[in-house]
């Protein structure tokens, strides 16, 4: 899991940016198994915020709960060497294993 987490964090850091109208920030929980990418900015003098990504790691599986980016996280992860079989697109209806 440590290797998967390192790759995930490295890829997620590539989504952090500062633009003309706003910025994105990566946040994580204390256990570093849940990550969010928060976008904040303004458009026509109106401020906006939204969660661009919600991702968690369970065992050796990356579960993408939300992805609102133009370059899908799954593509970036596969390109970085994570096997597609280790990625679940929950937002697209792929089945998430019961972890309770």
Image (cartoon, rainbow, N blue to C red):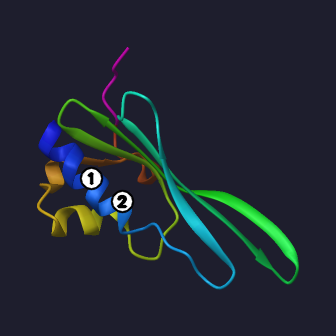
Region rendered in magenta: 96-100
Kindly identify which residue carries mark 2.
Answer: 12
Q: Residue at x 53, y 59 (%)?
A: 25
Q: Quadrant of residue 44?
A: bottom right
Whether 62 is drawn above or below 67: the answer is above
Assess whether residue 97 is covered by the magenta stretch.
yes
Quarter of the figure that contains the C terminus: top left
- At mark 1, the secondary structure is helix
Left or right: 53 in relation to 19: left
Q: Residues within 10 Å of mark 1 (few under 14, many from 20)?
A: many
Foreground: 1 or 10?
10
Front one among 31 and 93: 31
Which disc, if any, is residue 100?
none
Q: Is residue 52 magenta?
A: no
Circle 2: is it few (<14), some (14-19), or many (20+) Cα within 10 Å? many
- Residue 20 vertical placement versus 52 (above, below): below
Q: Position of residue 97 (x, y in %)?
A: 30, 28
Residue at 65% x, 85% y: name it: 20
In the current view of this chain or complex, which residue is farthest to the right? 45
Identify the image quadrant of the N terminus: top left
Q: Give the x, y percent position of residue 70.
A: 46, 76
Which residue reaches farthest top?
A: 100
Q: CA distance from mark 1 to mark 2?
A: 6 Å
Residue located at (55% from left, 75% from top): 18
- Callouts 1 and 2 close, C-beta under 8 Å: yes
Residue hosting label 1? 8
């Amino acid at each position: 899991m440590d290797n998967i987490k390192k790759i995930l964090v490295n890829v997620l850091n590539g989504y952090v940016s500062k633009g003309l109208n706003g910025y994105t920030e990566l946040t994580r929980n204390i256990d570093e198994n849940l990550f969010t990418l928060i976008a904040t900015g303004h458009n026509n003098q109106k401020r906006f915020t939204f969660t661009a990504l919600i991702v968690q790691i369970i065992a050796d599986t990356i579960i993408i709960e939300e992805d609102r980016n133009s370059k899908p996280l799954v593509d970036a992860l596969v390109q970085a060497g994570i096997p597609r079989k280790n990625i679940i697109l929950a937002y697209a209806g792929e089945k998430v294993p019961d972890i309770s």
